Image: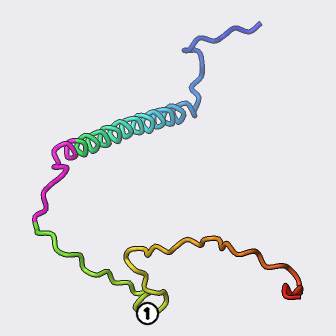
Amino acid sequence: MSRKPAPGELPEVPGSSARRARNIQRLQIGATGVILMILLVALASVVSNRAARTDATAVPEAAPTTEPSAMAPQNDPLVEAGVVPDLPATPVATPAATPSSAAPEPAGDVDPAE
């Protein structure tokens, strides 16, 4: 049977210091990533709070600083070029088609006078 050697009895493996350095580097990279994520969340929180504070202090319905003027005519380049017809600003009501009270025309070449 074999027994487990004590930690002092093991020979020094040449790759153990390299393995330790890799493990420390992995821990440093992981800790840096966690710290960067915390800073990113804190920055997003600051931006969100400042935006909420700005919205709360803004006047929702500020009075206009100038007198309103009459509406200027709208320029429509397609109408000016003649591509589309000039449509009126308000739609014109057209009368609905009403059914005529006349009898329907007979089908075919039959002359009703015969």
The image shows a total of numbered marks equal to 1
Left or right, 88 with respect to 104, comes to left
Image quadrant in which you'd find residue 44: top left
Q: Which of these two is toward me, 69 or 87? A: 87
The single residue placed furthest to the front in the displayed view is 114
Instruction: Find residue 64 and report its horizontal and vertical position in percent.
Output: 13, 62
State the extent of the magenta-drawn residues as a range.
53-65
Residue 89 lies, in percent from the top left, at 37, 76
- Say which residue appears at 55% left-offset and 30% top-offset: 16
Question: Measured along the vertical axis of the image, is residue 110 above or below residue 3?
Answer: below
The magenta stretch spans residue 71: no
**Residue type highlighted by circle 1:** Ala
Secondary structure mostly seen in magenta is: loop
**In the rendered image, which quarter contains the N terminus?**
top right
Query: Who's the residue at 43% across and 85% down the image?
Result: 86
In the visual, does 52 lie left or right of 75? left
Residue at image location 59% in from the left, 11% down from the top: 6
Q: Whole-percent x and y of residue 32?
A: 39, 38
Going by the image, does 98 lie left or right of 88?
right
Question: Element at badge 1?
Answer: helix
Q: Which residue is mark 1?
A: 81
Query: Residue 4, located in which quarter of the rendered image?
Result: top right
Residue 98: x and y, percent?
60, 71
Q: Judge by depth and name the residue closer to the eye, 82 or 109.
A: 109
The residue nearer to you, when weighing 85 against 13, is 85
Residue 62 is inside the magenta segment: yes
Using residue 90 as the reference point, say whether residue 43 is left or right of it.
Answer: left
Residue 20 sits above or below residue 10 on the image: below
| Res 114 → quadrant | bottom right
